[in-house]
């Protein structure tokens, strides 16, 4: 689990950088300033939650694997697709209906962070 999610976290970070660079260089003159802000919000949340997946991978290595950690990583990935993905497509296409999908990604992010917190609080500190 640790290597699997560390690999996916790294790939998602690479993708966030590429998508961000595309927006900064190719979309700056192609879409409105407001749409570019929406796009950049998607990149920001994409980056933060890809780092979250890396944090989950590190936690799995430190604490051991668990269903909560697995679900936290899955929910962060789902959030990236729904939240950031909908913002990317919305800002480029102008299809406002996609804004209805964005909050579902936000809920996935919140649930993922909650699962990570519950896992952390459920672990007993080792006494040496």
Image (cartoon, grey):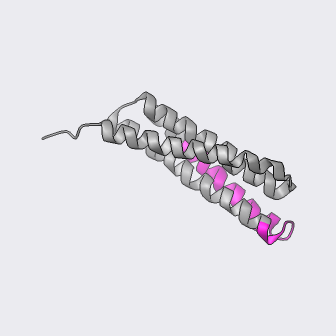
Residue 22's x, y, as percent?
A: 75, 60
Identity of the residue drawn at 73% across and 60% down: 39
User: In which quarter of the view is residue 57 placed?
Assistant: top left
> Given the current orientation, which residue lies at the most extreme top position?
67
Q: Is residue 17 above or below residue 56?
A: below
In front here: 126 or 4? 126
Left or right of 92 in this view: 100: left
Residue 69's x, y, as percent?
A: 44, 35
Residue 46's x, y, as percent?
A: 62, 52
Identity of the residue drawn at 43% across and 41% down: 116
Identity of the residue drawn at 47% across and 35% down: 3
Q: Quadrant of the C terminus?
A: top left
In front here: 81 or 14? 81
Q: Is residue 89 above or below residue 36?
A: above
Q: Which residues are magenta?
A: 9-34
Most frequent secondary structure within the magenta stretch:
helix
Residue 93's x, y, as percent?
A: 86, 54
């Amino acid at each position: 689990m640790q290597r699997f999610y560390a690999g996916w976290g790294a790939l998602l970070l690479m993708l966030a950088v590429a998508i961000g660079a595309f927006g900064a260089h190719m979309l700056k003159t192609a879409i409105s300033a407001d749409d570019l802000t929406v796009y950049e919000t998607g990149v920001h949340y994409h980056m933060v939650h890809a780092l979250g997946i890396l944090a989950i991978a590190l936690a799995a290595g430190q604490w051991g694997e668990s269903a909560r950690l697995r679900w936290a990583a899955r929910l962060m990935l789902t959030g990236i697709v729904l939240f950031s993905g909908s913002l990317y497509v919305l800002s480029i296409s102008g299809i406002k209906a996609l804004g209805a999908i964005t909050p579902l990604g936000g809920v996935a992010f919140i649930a993922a962070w909650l699962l990570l917190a519950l896992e952390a609080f459920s672990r007993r500190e080792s006494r040496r």
